[in-house]
Each structure stands twice: as C-alpha cells, then as structure tokens.
Image (cartoon, rainbow, N blue to C red):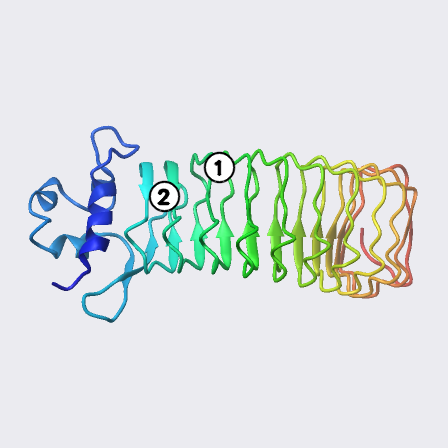
Amino acid sequence: MIYNEEDKEGMRIFFRQPSAVAGKTNGEQLGLQPKDMNDWDNKEEWIEKISILRWSDESPKRLTAIKWLNKKLAGTLDAAKWERLLKFDCSYNQLTGLDVRQNTALRELSCWGNRLTGLDLRNNTDLRRLKCSNNQLTSLDLRANPHLYYLYCFYNPLTALYTGANPYLKILNCIGNQLSTVDVSRNTYLESLSCCENELFELDVSANLKLERLRCTKNHLTSIDLHENTALTHLDVSDNPLTALALNVNKELVELICMKNQFYQLDLRENDKLSSVECGSNPPVQVILRDEINN
C-alpha cells in the first residue's frame, strides 16, 4: 500500500457524488473513468489520474495538498479523513457545503466562487491564508484563527466582520459585502485594506501605521483621516461624499484616485512621488502642485 487508506476513502466518498455536469460524478470531473471506480478498493492506480494532489514522503503517503480549481464539482465536501491536509483549493466549483472541522493542520484554504452559506473554522487554529470570496456567507467567525495574515472575503452578504483576534493580518479584502463597520484597530500589521462597496459611514485607520494600499470606494464616507498612514503608496477613495482630503504627510503616495467626491481643492504639494492622479467627476477642483503632474 502506497497511500493512506483514510485519505483514499475520503476521496472515494466525494467522488461518488454527482457533479455539476449532468450524468457525471465528481470523480469523473477530476479525471477518472467509471471503470476506475469499479475496483478502486483494491487498486491504487486511479489516484495517479486525479488532478493536482500532493502527498507526504512517509509510508503510507498522506495527503497534504489539493488543488481542484474550476472542475464543476458539486455537493458537500467533507474533508474529515484528510487529517494531514495543509493546503486546500476547491475554488470556482458549485459546492454547497465544505467541512474542514477535522483538518486542524490546515494552513491555506481557498474556496471562493462556490455556493457556500456557512464555513466553520473554529478548529483550524493554524490557518494562515483564507480566500472565501464569491459565496453566500452571512457570517464568518475568525476568532479561533490567530495566525491569519491573508483574508479575501469579498462579495458575500456579510453584515459583520470581526478581525480583532487576527493580530498578524496583513491583507484584508472585504469588498462588496453589507458591512456598516470595518474595525481594523487591532490589525497593526495591516498593509493592504480593500473595503469598497459596503455601507461604511466612517473608517478609522489610525492604528495601521504599516498601511500601504487603501481602497474604500463606493461607501458613505464624509471624511477620512490619513495622518498616521505615512507608508501609504496607493489610495482610492472614489465615489464617497468627501468634502476634503488631507495628504500632506503621505509623502510615499504614488497613485491617487479620488473621483466622484465633493471637494473643490486638492493640495498635493507634499506628494512628490505621485505618478498617477485621477480626480474627475468632482465639482471643479483646484489641484495645488509643487511640480506639474498630468491629471
């Protein structure tokens, strides 16, 4: 026996389920033929036909990584038997359920572009990277994931998102949810924040001294204070009712997009590194420059 029996059984259970393609199983969508499934309890050759699996070097081998991207898989995927799994990518399928509660070693999970309505990560205490965008998640509990540093959860109907238990978070993208608050006050390592297309009336980034990229377009912000964000290089505040934008301390800024706001003056005299400025669809704006910048 080359491969662990529990790992094989976990695959067999999922492969028997119908895929999103009429008349095809999930196993067939991953490269198997019906004949491969007839004797797969006694043979292991079928495993070599499965798309992108990685195994450990021990004997028997244990499943450590899966990449089943855009394979038209469907149903509920229970990963319980893959207890050594470190990386799992099942993005852009039509899964309605995903159970990773037993995968306590999991470090990277990508499940975006499915039909998931829930995701239980309470046992995945070593999770580092999570991509769960483009699903139907109404809640996302990350309190048990203290090592998380990369989070993509855009385009879900989330009404709340708490990242206070994720102190090492560096990248957060929560675009296109229904959030009225994005509290990043405890995310002091944050380098990139994208929170466009939500219901934000205020955004406090004063604790995020390492912030380099900020996108907060299509909200309801009437002001934003960036005086503590001296590392900022890219800023997009378009489509907000901002009446003023102070950037005098943001001297590392190289790109500024501030279209569809309500201010009449934009002082860029301290922003010598700016190479791109877009400020159209405002009232007539007086742009004050130290040197000429093409707008």
Q: Quadrant of the N terminus?
A: bottom left
- Where residue 82 appears, x then y in whole percent? 30, 54
Would you name the residue on which mark 2 appears? 70
Mark 2 or 1: in front is: 1
Q: Secondary structure at mark 1?
A: loop
- 126 or 282: nearer the viewer: 126
* Residue plotted at (47% across, 48% down): 121
Estimate the x, y position of residue 243 in percent, counting from the top left: 89, 41
Residue shown at the point (25%, 28%) measured from the top left:
22
Is residue 57 depicted above or below 84 in this figure?
A: below
Say if residue 72 shows up in the picture. Answer: no
**In percent of the image, x 51 and y 43: which residue is there?**
133
Picture coordinates of residue 244, whole percent (x, y): 89, 45
Q: Which of the two discs, 2 and 1, labels the residue nearer the N terminus?
A: 2
Which amino acid is tagged 1? Asn
Disc on res. 98: none
Quick check: can you spot residue 257? yes
Q: Left or right of 209: which side holds 161?
A: left
Residue behind mark 1: 135
- In percent of width and height, residue 217 lies at 72, 42
Query: What's the residue type where badge 2 is placed?
Result: Asn
Q: Quadrant of residue 284?
A: top right
In space, the residues marked 2 and 1 are separated at their CA atoms by 14 Å
Compared with 265, 220 (above or below) is: above
